[in-house]
């Protein structure tokens, strides 16, 4: 009602210390609901080759805890209205390896939920199951999105050298679901000729469904210069020079490829074919479907948030 009357019920971002608006650039391709985001750590030790955040966060593969994090969260929660959606996290993993000892994410998670907030956890880490006691207590207000790009452990070790094996992430999905926690599979990014094998994608979705996942959200790799150099090197090492050159063409020379807000996108028909394939498998397995920043919102399951947050209230 307040928003309909033109009253801004949310605090200005400048009044907050560590909880910030998600997507402050308001990308027209972003279909996420209104939400806030917090990063307990700067950087991430998963060291994913395709990580976009490494382009603008110095020493991104060396995670550092945020200074005065917990008191800053306590302060921010006093000015945020109860019940808003807060994501842990978007440009770094909240369960990056130092979390095992520091437990900052655990402390923040408990503060958020005890303050009446809805929480979306986005992670590649199996460490999330450590916090089942908190998640189970507040299961109605929390959902988890677990990223798995491939079930091929060898490929995953090259693409995501610091992340747990995908087989262990599947087990984490199963464990969370057994405790009544809503889980979305994030199958992204799909990298042409590197992680786009149809049979492997199908197997991944089928196994995620067996583990109890409720939704699949997918997207294609969007290239920036720094991360593309790493992805190109992986393609060359794993698939050969000709495949690496074709990958370069698709992003940098194909006249139908596009540049949007500094990211290089594959041609639309190729991106659409990936999305449509994943959608067909997901729906066959009884899962909801969405894409991330692709411009294909018409493919999404009606009433489902692309980030997997629909399952918390």
Image: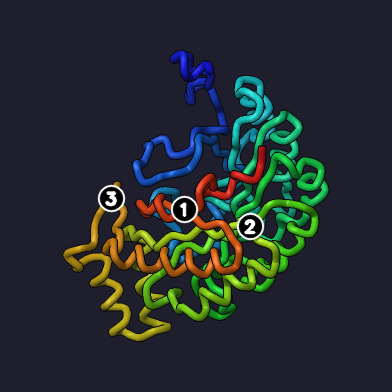
Mark 2 against mark 3, which lies toward the viewer?
2
- Ranked by sequence position, the earlier of labels 2 and 1 is 2
- Residue 52 figure quarter: bottom left
* Number of numbered discs on residues: 3
Please say if the residues under marks 2 and 3 sit with CB atoms less than 8 Å apart.
Answer: no
C-alpha distance separating marks 3 and 1: 21 Å
User: Image height check: is 49 above or below 182?
Assistant: below
Q: Residue at coordinates 43% horizontally, 63% vertically from top-left?
A: 50
272 is higher (above) or lower (below) than 56: below
Residue under numbered circle 1 = 300
Q: Whole-percent x and y of residue 6?
A: 44, 15
Q: Which residue is mark 2?
A: 214
C-alpha span from label 2 to label 3: 30 Å
Q: Is residue 32 visible?
A: yes
- Return the residue nearer the eye: 299 or 177: 299
Residue 187 locus on image (x, y percent): 52, 63
Residue denoted by label 3: 260
Residue visible at 71% across and 55% down in the picture: 128
**Mark 3 or mark 1, earlier in chain:** 3
Q: Residue 115 bears which disc, if any?
A: none
Q: Residue at x 73, y 64 (%)?
A: 174
Q: Residue reaching furthest left?
A: 255
Pick the quarter of the image with the C terminus.
Answer: top right
Neighbours of disc 2 within 10 Å: few (<14), some (14-19), many (20+):
many
Q: x, y (%) of residue 284?
A: 56, 68
- Closest to the observer: 169 or 74? 169
Which class describes the residues within 10 Å of circle 1: few (<14), some (14-19), or many (20+)?
Answer: some
Spatial CA span between label 2 and label 1: 14 Å
| Quarter of image, res 54 | bottom left
- Is residue 249 left or right of 182 when viewed as pictured? left
Q: Does dot 3 land on a helix, a strand or a loop?
A: strand
Identify which residue is drawn at 60% across, 63% down: 286
């Amino acid at each position: 009602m307040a928003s309909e009357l033109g009253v801004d019920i949310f605090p200005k971002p400048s009044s907050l210390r560590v909880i910030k608006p998600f997507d402050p650039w308001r990308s027209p391709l972003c279909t996420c609901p209104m939400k806030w985001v917090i990063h307990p750590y700067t950087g991430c030790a998963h060291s994913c080759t395709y990580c976009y955040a490494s382009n603008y966060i110095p020493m991104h593969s060396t995670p550092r805890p945020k200074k005065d994090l917990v008191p800053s969260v306590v302060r921010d929660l006093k000015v945020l209205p109860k019940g808003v959606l807060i994501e842990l996290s978007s440009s770094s993993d909240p369960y990056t390896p130092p979390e095992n000892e520091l437990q900052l994410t655990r402390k923040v998670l408990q503060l958020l939920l005890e303050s009446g907030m809805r929480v979306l956890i986005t992670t590649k880490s199996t460490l999330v199951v450590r916090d089942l006691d908190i998640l189970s207590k507040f299961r109605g207000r929390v959902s988890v999105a677990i990223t798995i790009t491939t079930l091929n452990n060898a490929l995953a070790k090259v693409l995501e050298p610091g992340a747990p094996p995908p087989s262990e992430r599947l087990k984490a999905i199963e464990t969370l679901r057994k405790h009544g926690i809503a889980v979305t599979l994030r199958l992204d990014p799909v990298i042409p000729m590197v992680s786009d094998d149809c049979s492997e994608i199908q197997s991944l979705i089928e196994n995620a469904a067996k583990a109890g996942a409720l939704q699949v959200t997918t997207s294609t790799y969007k290239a920036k210069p720094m991360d593309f150099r790493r992805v190109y090197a992986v393609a060359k090492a794993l698939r050969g020079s000709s495949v690496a050159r074709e990958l370069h063409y698709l992003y940098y020379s194909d006249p139908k490829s596009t540049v949007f807000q500094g990211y290089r996108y594959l041609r639309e028909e190729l991106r659409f074919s990936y999305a449509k394939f994943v959608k067909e498998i997901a729906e066959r397995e009884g899962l909801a479907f969405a894409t991330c920043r692709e411009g294909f919102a018409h493919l999404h399951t009606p009433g489902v948030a692309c980030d997997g947050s629909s399952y918390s209230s």
